[in-house]
Image (tube, coloured by chain):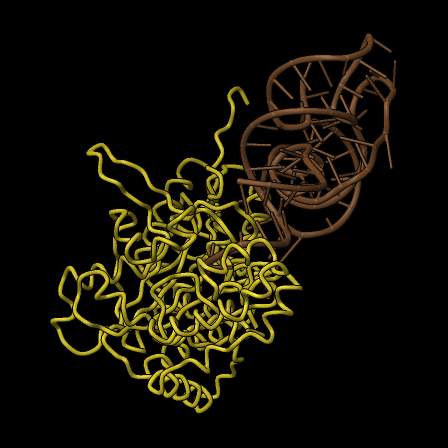
Chain colours: A yellow, B brown
Amino acid sequence: MFMDVIQAARGTRDILPEEVTYWQQVEAVARDLLQRAAYREIRTPIFEQTPLFERGIGEATDIVGKEMYTFLDRGDRSITLRPEGTAGAVRAYVEHHLHAQGGVQRLWYLGSMFRYERPQAGRQRQFHQLGVEVLGSADPRADAEVVAIAAQFLQALGIQGWTLMLNTVGTSADRQHYREALVRYFSPYAADLDPDSQERLHRNPLRILDSKDPKTQTIAQSAPQIFDYLSDASRQHFEQVQALLTQLEIPFQLNPCLVRGLDYYTHTAFEFQLADLGAQSTVCGGGRYDRLVTELGGPETPAVGWAIGLERLILSLQNLGACAVATPDCYVVSRGQDAEAQALKLAHELRQQGWSVELDLSGSAFGKQLKRAARSNTPLCLILGDTEAQAQTLQLKWLKSGEQATLSQLELLQTADELKAKIFVCKKAKTV
RNA sequence: GCGAGCGUAGCCAAGAGGUUAAGGCAGCGGAUUGUGGUUCCGCCAUUCGUGGGUUCGAGUCCCAUCGUUCGCCCCA
C-alpha cells in the first residue's frame, strides 16, 4: 500500500460478519428470554459526567482509580466513557423518577463499556455487557430470579459447565465488623503476606481473601468468615437465597472469598465462571446493591442485578463450534446486458415478496457464477442469459438435484410462495 | 501499571547472518466462449509490523516503537 494503514485503536476490535452471527444469536436469545421474564430494555448514554461513577462505583475501586476513560470536553466538563452499566441505569431511574411508577422495575441493557486496561484475550478496552437490574425489591426471590435468569440464558445458548460462585457481603455494618476482625487476624502475619496483600491490610482487607499468592492463601484459609459476622437479618436473607436456588435446581458453590470489586454491593454476591476462558474466567458477575440508589440521590431502593461480558461469552460459544449462518433463498446468475437488467429487477421483486436473494454481480462466465452459487449454499439458482431475456423467461435450477426447468418470469413471481415453501424444506434438510 | 513470549501474503506457515523469500488454504484467470462443488495449468510478498543501528551482507543479531498473546493486578 502507499500509505500507512490505520489500525483499530488499542484494545478495540472489529467484529466481522462471520463473528456477528454469534452476537446476533446472543442478542436474540437475550431479548426473548428477558421479554418473557418481564424485563424492559433501557438505553442510557455511553458517556456520563465523571462524578456519577466516582460516587456510584466508589473512589477506592480500581475501576475509578485507574481504569476510566476520562477527559474534559470542550466545555471543560469532566466526561467519562461508562466503565459499567449499573450506574447509568440507576442514574436514569432516579432522574426520571421511575420509582414513582411504584412496584418493582425490571430493566436490562446491552452495550459498550470502556475500561483503560491492558488488553488480553477476553479483555478489551471497549467491551460489551448485557446486564439486568431489578430495582425496588429486597426480597430474596429477586436475588434468586436474577441468578436463575443468568443460568437460563447460558443454558439457552448451549453453554454447559459453568460454575456459580455465591457469597454474601452483608450490610455495610456487618462488613465493618468483619473488616475489623480480618485486620485483627491478619496483622500478626503481616510480614508473611504478599506485598499486595500487605498493602491491602488497612485499605481493603476483604481483598486479601482472594489473593492468588500461595502463602497468603494458606494464611487466609483459617481467617474469620463473613458468615460469623452477619446480622440475623443478613444471615436469613442469604439462607433464603440459597434455599430458593436449591429449589430452582441451580447448583452453586459457596465461596467465602468471593469479593466483588465495586463498592456498592451488599448481601448477595455471585459470579458465573467458565472453565475454557483462561485467566478471564468470570463471564457474569452480580449481586445486590441496596445502597446505590440513595447514594445517587434517589429514594431508599433495594436492588439486585448482574452483567455478562459478551466477548467472553462469545469466546466460549465459539469453542462450542460454528453458529448457523443464514443462507439466501436463491442465487441469481445472469449474463448479457438485458438479462443482467432483468435479473436485477427479478431479485428486487422477489425480495419484495419476502425472499432473500443474492445477485451475482461479477459478469463472469456462467460456469464461474454457478460455482459461486453452489458455494453460497443456497438451494435454488435462477439463470438468465440472452435467450431467457428475449423470451422473458428464466432457468430455475435446484442445485442439489440439478433439476432444471424453464419458467416465465411472471410465472416465477406468481408462484413465489409455493417455491418458497419448497426452499424452506431444502434448507431444513441441509441443516439436519 | 509490572513480567514474559510473539509479529513473514487475506489465512496457516517454512526460514536459525550469505540472497531468485518454501509449501498449503483461500482468491483470480484459463483448459470448459450458456451451466456448479472433481482434475489440470497459470497468476497472486522488489519484501518479512514500523523506525533506527551492527555487518561486505539482516526476515534472521541489537535498540526503540506499535500491535498482539500469556501471566500478575483487577474485572465482565
Res B3 → quadrant: top right
Q: Position of residue A202 (x, y in %)?
A: 46, 59
Q: Position of residue B45 (x, y in %)?
A: 67, 25
Q: Position of residue A317 (x, y in %)?
A: 54, 64
Left or right of B47? Residue B73 is left
Res A25 → quadrant: bottom left
Q: Nearer the viewer, residue A348 or A151?
A: A151
Q: Nearer the viewer, residue A381 or A143?
A: A143
Residue at the spot 42% in from the left edge and 41% down from the top edge: A339
Residue A63 visible: yes
Residue A350 visible: no
Q: Is residue A219 above or below residue A47?
A: below
Q: Is residue B49 above or below residue A328?
A: above
Residue at the spot 62% in from the left edge and 69% down from the top edge: A219
Q: Quadrant of the N terminus of chain A?
A: top right
Q: How many marks?
A: 0
Q: Position of residue A190 (x, y in %)?
A: 58, 61
Residue at the spot 52% in from the left edge and 77% down from the top edge: A224
Q: Quadrant of the C terminus of chain A?
A: bottom right
Q: Residue furthest front?
A: A188
Q: Nearer the viewer, residue A99 or A216?
A: A216
Left or right of B43? Residue A37 is left
Q: Is residue A391 above or below residue A181?
A: above
